Amino acid sequence: MKTLLAMCGGCLIFQAAASDTPAFRLTQRDIPERGQVGALQLAVGQQQVSLILPKNWRVGQAAEGVVLQAADYSATLIVKSVKSSESLNQELKNRLAEASPAVVIGKEYGWTTGAGEATVIEACLGDANELPLQSRTYIIKLKEQSLVLTLSAAATQFAKAELLISSVIASLRVE
């Protein structure tokens, strides 16, 4: 497994390169309080997973995975599917640490999503001469595949992006 550490729209992207970009389609989801909202449906292994799209975010596909990007380019969410393993969390942290001496891996903790429990890994890149970037990776094990979502933003924009993406993560569901 290789790790990709790259800049995309001013954001840190940390993803396992030996993974699959899930097939996806744009759709609508009915929310009683809001009516129809934009949604993204993904094929993760044999399962279908969906999430509500952040308003005004762009959706595309790249080698890194399915890319959701804020309209002002302040934040990026990368969605990938990787083969589940007991050591996946540690492998991702090890590869990230090997990718750049300027990366500081933060805490690891649990997070409840609409698709099950996730492990979260935080990271920061930057020094006094650079704009620091923050990254939060959610790893959700779904049978033989894991869904890996990585939010990246400049440290000055991270709190705003984090608030928005928290609701996206909560909207995840297995179809």
Image: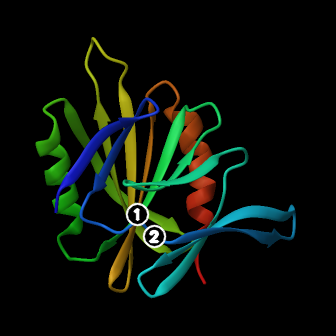
Q: Residue at x 22, y 77 (%)?
A: 85
Residue 140: give its label.
Answer: none
Left or right of 20 in this view: 16: left
Left or right of 12 in this view: 112: right
Is residue 49 depicted above or below 2 in this figure? below
Tell me which colouring the rendered structure shows: rainbow
* Circle 2 Cα neighbour tier, 10 Å, few/some/many (<14 / 14–19 / ≥20): many
Q: Residue at x 52, y 37 (%)?
A: 75
State the residue lying farthest toward the top. 129
Q: Residue at x 87, y 64 (%)?
A: 33
Tally the marks. Answer: 2
Q: Position of residue 63 (x, y in %)?
A: 37, 55
Task: Choose between 141 and 3: the one closer to the eye.
Answer: 3
* Circle 1 Cα neighbour tier, 10 Å, few/some/many (<14 / 14–19 / ≥20): many
Left or right of 48 in this view: 8: left
Tell me which numbered mark, 1 or 2, is placed earlier along the sequence.
2
Kind of residue at badge 2: Pro
Q: Residue at x 16, y 63 (%)?
A: 1
Is residue 150 depicted above or below 33 in this figure? above
Kind of residue at badge 1: Lys
Is residue 68 depicted above or below 115 in this figure? above
Image quadrant in which you'd find residue 131: top left
Q: Position of residue 118 (x, y in %)?
A: 41, 67
Q: Position of residue 138 (x, y in %)?
A: 40, 59
Q: Which residue is mark 1?
A: 80
Q: Quadrant of the C terminus?
A: bottom right
State the CA–CA distance, disc 1 to disc 2.
Answer: 6 Å
Q: Position of residue 98 (x, y in %)?
A: 11, 44
Residue 22: give its label.
Answer: 2
Label 1: which secondary element? strand
Image quadrant in which you'd find residue 57: top right
**In contact (CB < 8 Å): disc 1 and disc 2:** yes
